Amino acid sequence: MQKTPLIRRSDEILGGTPVFAGTRVPVRTLFDYLEEGDTLEEFLDDFPAVSREHAVKVLQITKETMLSQEYESIA
């Protein structure tokens, strides 16, 4: 069973910037929106090529990756 990729990176698409697979929407844009206080809904409204399911899966993978890392305590 082959999984459908969530993120794609190719030199032919935005110079290798990671994008939501099947789109030209940079993944970084989602994080920029959230960082600025925008909601997921606002991001999805502005980038209809990205489905809610796709965005949530990318957020979940990022969360799992971050939580699986070991970090020194930050004071």
Image (spheres, grey):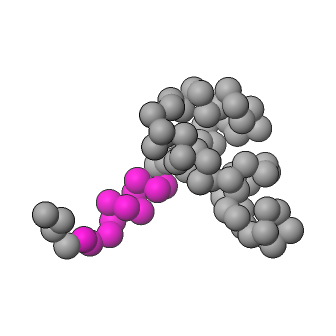
Q: Residue at x 48, y 55 (%)?
A: 61
Give the magenta-colored segment's residue range: 61-71
Quarter of the picture containing the C terminus is bottom left
Q: Please count the marks in the image.
A: 0
Asked if residue 68 lies in the magenta stretch, the reply is: yes
Quarter of the picture containing the N terminus is bottom right
Q: Is residue 38 left or right of residue 71?
A: right
> Most extreme residue toward the front, as rendered?
36
> Most extreme residue toward the right, as rendered?
12
Q: Residue at x 70, y 31 (%)?
A: 46
The x, y position of residue 39, in whole percent, is 50, 29
- Residue sitting nearer the eye, 61 or 37: 37
The x, y position of residue 44, in whole percent, is 64, 31
Q: Residue at x 46, y 43 (%)?
A: 35
- Kindly tell me whether residue 62 is visible in this rendering: yes
- Residue sitting nearer the eye, 20 or 17: 17
- Kindly tell me whether residue 1 is visible in this rendering: no
Q: Residue at x 68, y 35 (%)?
A: 51
The x, y position of residue 2, in whole percent, is 70, 62
State whether residue 2 is above or below residue 22: below
State whether residue 70 is above or below residue 55: below
The x, y position of residue 45, in whole percent, is 67, 26
State whether residue 41 is above or below residue 10: above
Asked if residue 12 lies in the magenta stretch, the reply is: no
State whether residue 68 is above or below residue 36: below
Classified by dominant secondary structure, the portion drawn in magenta counts as helix
